[in-house]
Amino acid sequence: MSWIFQGNPNRFDIDDYLSRYSQLIYWRTNRYVNDILVGDPVFIWRAGNEAGAVAVGHVVEKPAPAHTVKHPQALGDDLWVANEASSSEFKTGIQLSEILLSADDGMVTRGTAKDDSVLAASTIMKVPNGTVFRLSGGELAALVRLWRAPVAAAQTAGTTEGQRQLRAHYTRERSSRLRRDKLSVFRQEHGSLYCEICGFSASAHHPEPFTERAYEVHHKSPLSAAAAPVRTTLHDLAVLCANCHRAIHASSHVTENYEELAKLYASRR
Ligand SMILES: [Zn+2]
Ligand SMILES: [Zn+2]
């Protein structure tokens, strides 16, 4: 059996959750608790204004009360907008293989699904509320086919592991809450914003309110698929100017590039 788990961004910050826990997530499961099995394919569907399938994976822990899950640190209880988390509700553990938060990345938008003859008739299109839906074989096949379809068509070769990891990297860096929190903590600690590699200070060049936009937040941890869920924290992030960020992403050896460029600048100070 395969499944769609739906979430409403007005009640739970889905993008931030998927950005912070890009490997293992838990989803509230209010029905089918005896039908959902380890290994079942899963799509995560974001409701709201930018509705559509935004992540794909498979079940690794069958539905169980929240207080019994294997990795409680990955529950993301703090991301509920309303205080809704309860330790007795059932949660399904899902290992994610890919997250695509925008149409540009290749998520399956509600509009795309509506144009598909099979998906147009599916429950997810007709029932705006509800958390878990069963996917028929035809619906699963349609979602798999449409997933990354525009992006895949533009690529001659298939996705390499490097490309997949790079997308995961940018997904995490795009979490607006992480960025906001990082910049604000950095400013508190250092008095102002500057690039951690080259020392560039935008306030010397750009007037407000453009100063902050000159900075990007870079994820320093290696992009490996660890078995246990790893939460992205503010310590994993570096504040960089757009030039340095681009330079260290110029090749796939991002960690080495970061260290080399930082060392070069440090030796010039
Ligand atoms: Zn810089
Ligand atoms: Zn980066």
Image (tube, rainbow, N blue to C red):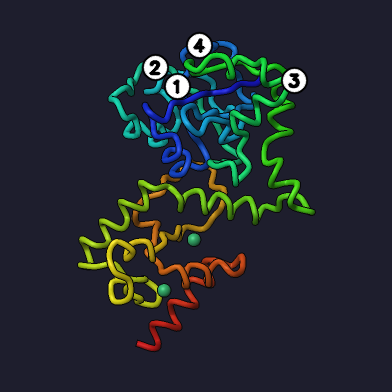
Residue type for callout 3: Gly
Q: Do the numbered discs 1 and 2 sit on residues whose CB atoms are within 8 Å?
A: yes
Residue 129 percent across, percent down from the top left: 47, 16
Quadrant of the rendering where the N terminus is positioned = top right
Q: Residues within 10 Å of mark 4 (few under 14, many from 20)?
A: some
Examine the rendered structure and indicate whether residue 254 appears above or below residue 139: below
Mark 4 or 2, nearer chain start: 4
Label placed on residue 138? 3
What's the CA distance linking mark 1 and mark 2? Answer: 7 Å
Q: Do the numbered discs 3 and 1 sit on residues whose CB atoms are within 8 Å?
A: no
Please give the name of the residue rendered at 70% of the width and 43% of the height, measured from the top-left corner.
Answer: 150
* Of marks 3 and 1, the one in the foreground: 3
Residue type for callout 4: Arg
What's the CA distance linking mark 4 and mark 2? Answer: 11 Å
Please give the name of the residue rendered at 45% of the width and 83% of the height, measured from the top-left corner.
Answer: 264
Q: Which residue is mark 4?
A: 31
* Of marks 1 and 2, the one in the foreground: 1
Point out the quarter of the image occupied by ligand 1.
bottom left
Residue type for callout 1: Arg
Indicate left or right for 185 with 20 as reference: left
Residue 92 percent across, percent down from the top left: 50, 23
Please give the name of the residue rendered at 20% of the width and 60% of the height, measured from the top-left corner.
Answer: 188
**Residue placed farthest to the right in the image?**
156
Q: Do the numbered discs 3 and 2 sit on residues whose CB atoms are within 8 Å?
A: no
Label placed on residue 89? 2
Q: Which residue is mark 1?
A: 28
Mark 3 or 1, nearer chain start: 1
Q: Residues within 10 Å of mark 1 (few under 14, many from 20)?
A: many
What's the CA distance linking mark 3 and mark 1? Answer: 25 Å
What's the CA distance linking mark 3 and mark 2? Answer: 30 Å
